[in-house]
Image (cartoon, helix red, strand yellow):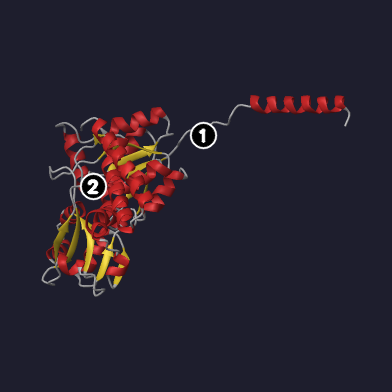
Amino acid sequence: MNRRIVLALAASVACVSAAALAVPAVAEPAKTELVFSVLSAESQTSAEKDWAPFIADLGKAVGMPVKAYYGSNYTALIEAMRFKQTDLGWFTNLSGLEAVRRAGGEVFARSVNPSGTDGYEGVIVVKKGSGITLARILKCDRSLNFGMGDAKSTSGTLAPMTYLFAPRKIDPATCFKTVRAANHEANLFSVANGLMDAATNNTASMDRLSLLHTEMAKRTLGNVEIVWRSPRIPEDPLIWRKDLDPALKRKIAAFMFSYGVGNTAAAVRQRAILNQIQTLPFKHADNTHLLIVREMEAAGQLVEARNKNDPAAIAKAEASLAQIRKEKAAAPKA
């Protein structure tokens, strides 16, 4: 090809490229609705009843409608944030960690246990009077039907795997007759009614059920007993998308950290609403809130690597654990 033609073509391409670069980026349209995701560890019906007043108040504070997105499937909540179908929400620690890692999320607040004891425990429950003990559960003779939480549940899966099963080289899939994953409410009802021999749960979920003061709640809680408790787990984080408009973030934060604070009639009303969703007024938090669940995760991976006698995996898990503990030591104290 003639050199002058080549140079002319190159110049034309350069002009087109420059023109393309000069076109301003299309700005994301201003939000007209905020979507708040709720981790419904119980039924959606009870979650909607408890959360509706809070969601309505949030909408008034930010000056736009707020839509609630309920779900008991943790992966669905993470993916919803990843694809910008939700803007902020209440997560468990483990699902919150995944939202930060994979969905552009950022911890900005945390709940506070209304009992006065900050944090909660993962538990295993059996039917009262069944005679099933922790030793019987750990016998692993494939005679028991066992209920676990969602794969991304902190108390329903990560805690029992980290603190109970993995250190004993127990795989629930081969330990029990059947293993079923369900939300906390379903697992508790199944055990109370003799449909499941044992299941994971947590003290916060059981406390929440006791607040209902219904005959069914009393009967359910009266029919189960706890045979194992995990170490204390941090309260749940609230997470928003990092790319939310800073002005909108300020409005959300102003609402969250003033809601239920003070001695006015409005604050008293707000604290009653917070009580229904099992928290005192929210506290400030950031991604360091997830260090403990990261530590649990890494400790579980180390146990698993040692069980498999995998030197490379052991070294990787030990390095990860050391780094997390270094970050914990450097993190500001709550």
Tag 2: residue type? Ile
Q: Quadrant of residue 108?
A: top left
Report the label total. Answer: 2
| Among numbered discs 2 and 1, the one appearing first in the sequence | 1
Picture quadrant where residue 99 is located: top left
Element type at marker 2? Answer: loop
Q: Disc 2, disc 1: CB below 8 Å?
A: no
For the point 18% across and 47% down, the residue is 232
- The residue tagged with tag 1: helix, strand or loop? loop
Please name the residue shown 33% across and 36% down the image: 60
Give the number of the disc on residue 29.
1
* Residue bearing the label numbered 2: 277
For the C terminus, the quadrant is top left
Query: In this picture, is 26 found above or below 200?
Result: above
Check the image and name the residue furthest to the bottom: 143
Q: Residue 2, percent across and down?
A: 89, 28
Residue 36: image location, x then y, percent: 36, 43
Mark 1: few/some/many CA within 10 Å (<14, 14-19, 20+): few
Could you tell me the amino acid type at mark 1?
Answer: Pro
Q: Where does residue 35 sit, x and y in percent of width and height?
A: 39, 43
